[in-house]
Every structure is written in structure tokens, then in C-alpha cells.
């Protein structure tokens, strides 16, 4: 399990830092020249001057909601669907396009292991020549392709299981005997429980790489007790792999192809090592060159290096959201989506989405202030529930409350889940 994928993981930290910073000016210049959005955002910046982290910290942070706003504005005018953040166009350079809730559109370039997921898959114990059962979605969102292209780069064969059809997933695992599973941790738990219910054993499934949701120690231990060593990674549809877990299980090691900063939420100012802040990433991906991209996720840098010998910095992992956007069953839910639901119903005044339960078993409930009379309550609740599913792709309970009931604190999404 401590085998490294390549020599990059064992580099002297000073050598790695020098290489990343040496690549930074060229990447900024490339973004200015080939991505119209960054030509505007960085129009007063001399790329050749950005040769240190201090210089990088002077550039503006582009947060996810700003990227979404620019995409929507551009599309409304019949312009670039990516908001001008892409440096490649439709055709051989962009074999696939994906959509995340918003909708946000993300390009996939043609380079092998475009999302750089092979490193995380290898750290989870997968080896060339093995079969991987991939249960990430293969439609709309890029997770399925992210993992498949990484597995192929590692030399693995992939069964594209996708989501749902739990009994068929169990049957395929039993008959194909994959070396392990890739997908959300909650779905792996469901598959294991379904196999027990069906009286089917899955002796080959001994390892897993999970992502898309929080992975609490309680769930990790539950899987270990059932013979599956599961490791997590942190990736986004915009950036690809950011960090991955190793057998040491001491934080997540940063990927070799990104420059990571932790900044004070709401600003672009880096915080001292160890302090919790928003994770900001500069990608060295030439096709989608995101410079100081604010993920909206909270984390912190850990001191020291990974006991496995990997020398890159480590982060504590996902520690919540710097904004109110949250992730439910592997899907981001934005305050703007809640507002869109409210706009569809003239009698709806305000709404507050509460996410509760334990991770891997979470649920949503939308509390809506409404002027609607009790006679139309059942029909309105059903209509709102359908709107939520249409906009977020997730199911939610709906509770109608009287005007003035919800707290006047500006909160649209409340994450009340247990992370123990």
C-alpha cells in the first residue's frame, strides 16, 4: 500500500515548490492568451512577475459562484457556454462536456488521465491488470469519466456500473470478481448490505476509493470490519484531483499538479499553517486553466509529511463549506437553487433548506414560508417537491410554514448533519 505511483511523490519539497512556481508564470500567460475570462480578470497582471506564493496571493480569487454567473451571462448572450474560462474548443481537443448543478458546464480534454485521478486510485491500492467496479455516475456529471480515465492510465479495466440497480451491481460484482469499488461511500454501504440480504458473498472486493461525500471514521471502520479497505480522495468537476488519502490515514496528500492555498473565507488572504480557511486552487491544466479558483470548501494544512514517504503537503480533508453551498448524496446544492424553487411559486415568500441525518444517510427538508391557504397545502407541497427534484436532482421533504416563521439570519441552507 505504500508503493508510490512515480518519483514525483517523493521529491524534495523545495524541488517541488520550485517546479510549481516555475510553471506558474507560463500558466498565467497561457490563461490570459487563450481563456477570454482570464484575459479580462487578469488584464492588469504581468504574468512574468508571478513567481512566488506572495505574488500569487495578490491575484483575485475566482469563486465557484462567480464562474457560474459568468457562464450564465455568456450563455444568455449566445456566447461561450463555459464563460470564457476554457482554452480549448469543441472537437478532438474536447471529447466530452459535463454538467454540474447550476448548471455549470465543464470541459474534458483529450490528454490521458485528464483529471489526474490515477494517483489517488494507486494510493488506494489498485494495480495495473485489475478490474475496478466504478459506481460513479456516467451521465451529466464527470465523476464516472474522471475515475475511468484515471483507472485506464493506471492500466486497470473498468466495469461502468454507474448508480442505482443495486441487485444488478451485486450480481456483476459476484460474477466479474473486481478487485475493488470506486464510488460514493454511501452506495458501497448499500451494495454490501444488499449482498447480505441476497445471500451473496463478494470476496474479491477488498479495496475501495470513495469520494463525493464525507467519509466519517465510523463508516470507514464499518467497511473495514467487512473486509473492505476504503480510502477517500478530494476532487472537483472543475479541477480534477486535489488531494488523496494514503494507507497512513493521516490527512490527504495534495496532488502534484495543483498549487493549493488556504485563505480566510470571503477574502484572498492566505492564513497561517494549521488555521482553517477556504481552499483555493491554481490548476496547471492547460485546457481549463483555473487561476486561484475558490472551491468554497474549508480545510487546513497539516504540518509534517505523510508517513508513507510522500513529501507533498497534506490537508485535513473536507471540513465544511466556506459558503452555504453544501453537498448532499454527492451533489452540490446552491442557495441559488433554493431561490429558483421559491421563484416558481407566487405564494412562496422565503425558504430554508435543512440538511440533516448522518453522513451517508442524509436527507433534505425545505421549509417554505407561504401565504397559501390550508386547502391547497397538499397540492402545493407536491409541486414544490417536484420543483426541488427538477432543479437539484435530489428528493426533499417540504414543510409549509406561516410568514415570519423562519429566522431572519440570511441563511438559506443549513447543514445540520452529524460528522462524527
Image: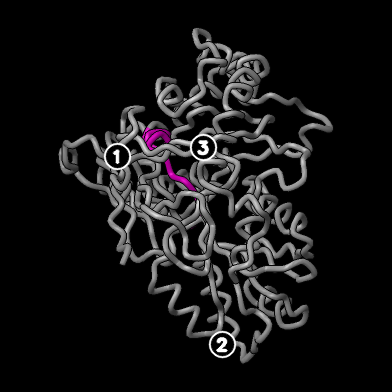
The disc at residue 272 is 1
Quarter of the figure with the C terminus? bottom left
**Above or below 366: residue 3:** below
Residue at 70 percent across and 78 percent down: it is 173
**Above or below 149: residue 289:** above
Q: Are circles 3 and 2 on residues that touch, CB within 8 Å?
A: no
Quarter of the figure with the N terminus? bottom right
Determine the CA span between mark 2 and mark 1. Answer: 50 Å
> How many C-alpha atoms fall within 10 Å of the one at disc 2: few (<14), some, or many (≥20)?
few
Where residue 381 appears, as percent x and y from the top left, is: 37, 49
Determine the CA span between mark 3 and mark 2. Answer: 46 Å
Q: Is residue 305 left or right of residue 205?
A: left
Please tell me which residue lies in front, 75 or 242: 242
Highlighted range, magenta: 329-342
Please tell me which residue lies in front, 372 or 63: 63
Q: Is residue 59 left or right of residue 180?
A: left
Please tell me which residue lies in front, 179 or 82: 179
**Above or below 331: residue 186:** below
Judging by the rendered image, the residue that carries numbered circle 3 is 259
Q: Is label 2 in a helix, a strand or a loop?
A: helix
> How many C-alpha atoms fall within 10 Å of the one at disc 1: few (<14), some, or many (≥20)?
few
Tally of marks? 3
Q: Between disc 1 and disc 3, whose residue precedes? A: 3
Q: Is label 1 in a helix, a strand or a loop?
A: loop
Q: Is 337 within the magenta? A: yes
Q: Nearer the viewer, mark 3 or mark 2?
A: 3
How is colour applied across the structure in the image?
A: one colour
Where residue 338 appears, as percent x and y from the top left, is: 38, 39
Residue 375 in sight = no
Q: Is 261 within the magenta? A: no
Q: Between disc 3 and disc 2, whose residue precedes? A: 2
Judging by the rendered image, the residue that carries numbered circle 2 is 197
Amino acid at each position: 500500500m505504500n508503493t508510490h505511483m512515480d518519483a514525483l511523490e517523493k521529491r524534495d519539497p523545495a524541488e517541488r515548490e520550485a517546479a510549481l512556481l516555475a510553471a506558474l508564470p507560463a500558466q498565467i500567460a497561457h490563461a490570459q492568451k487563450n481563456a477570454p475570462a482570464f484575459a479580462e480578470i487578469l488584464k492588469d497582471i504581468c504574468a512574468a512577475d508571478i513567481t512566488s506564493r506572495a505574488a500569487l496571493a495578490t491575484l483575485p480569487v475566482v469563486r465557484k459562484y462567480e464562474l457560474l454567473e459568468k457562464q450564465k451571462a455568456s450563455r444568455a448572450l449566445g456566447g461561450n457556454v463555459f464563460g470564457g474560462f476554457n482554452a480549448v474548443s469543441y472537437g478532438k481537443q474536447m471529447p466530452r462536456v459535463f454538467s454540474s448543478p447550476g448548471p455549470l458546464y465543464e470541459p474534458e480534454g483529450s490528454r490521458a488521465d485528464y483529471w489526474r485521478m490515477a494517483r489517488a486510485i494507486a494510493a488506494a491500492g489498485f494495480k495495473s491488470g485489475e478490474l475496478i467496479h466504478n459506481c460513479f455516475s456516467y451521465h451529466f456529471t464527470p465523476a464516472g469519466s474522471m475515475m475511468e480515465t484515471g483507472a485506464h492510465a493506471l492500466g486497470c479495466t473498468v466495469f461502468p456500473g454507474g448508480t442505482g440497480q443495486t441487485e444488478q451491481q451485486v450480481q456483476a460484482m459476484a460474477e466479474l470478481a473486481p478487485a475493488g469499488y470506486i464510488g460514493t461511500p454511501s452506495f458501497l454501504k448499500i451494495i454490501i448490505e444488499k449482498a447480505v440480504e441476497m445471500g451473496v458473498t463478494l470476496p474479491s472486493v477488498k479495496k475501495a476509493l470513495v469520494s463525493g461525500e464525507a467519509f466519517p471514521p465510523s463508516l470507514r471502520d464499518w467497511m473495514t470490519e467487512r473486509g473492505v479497505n476504503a480510502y477517500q480522495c478530494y476532487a472537483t468537476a472543475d479541477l480534477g484531483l486535489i488531494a488523496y488519502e494514503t494507507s497512513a490515514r493521516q490527512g490527504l496528500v495534495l496532488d502534484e499538479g495543483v498549487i493549493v492555498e488556504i485563505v480566510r473565507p470571503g477574502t484572498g488572504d492566505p492564513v497561517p499553517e494549521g488555521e482553517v480557511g477556504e481552499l483555493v486552487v491554481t490548476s496547471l491544466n492547460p485546457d481549463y486553466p483555473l487561476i486561484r479558483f475558490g472551491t468554497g470548501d474549508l480545510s487546513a494544512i497539516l504540518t509534517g509529511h505523510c508517513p508513507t514517504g510522500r513529501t507533498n503537503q497534506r490537508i485535513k480533508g473536507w471540513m465544511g463549506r466556506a459558503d452555504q453551498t453544501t453537498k448532499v448524496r454527492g451533489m452540490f446544492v446552491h442557495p441559488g437553487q433554493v431561490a429558483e424553487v421559491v421563484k416558481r411559486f407566487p405564494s412562496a415568500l422565503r425558504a430554508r433548506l435543512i440538511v440533516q441525518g448522518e453522513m451517508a444517510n442524509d436527507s433534505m427538508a425545505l421549509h417554505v414560508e407561504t401565504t397559501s391557504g390550508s386547502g391547497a397545502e397538499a397540492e402545493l407541497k407536491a409541486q414544490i417537491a417536484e420543483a426541488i427534484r427538477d432543479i437539484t436532482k435530489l428528493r426533499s421533504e417540504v414543510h409549509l410554514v406561516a410568514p415570519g416563521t423562519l429566522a431572519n439570519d440570511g441563511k438559506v441552507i443549513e447543514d445540520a448533519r452529524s460528522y462524527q
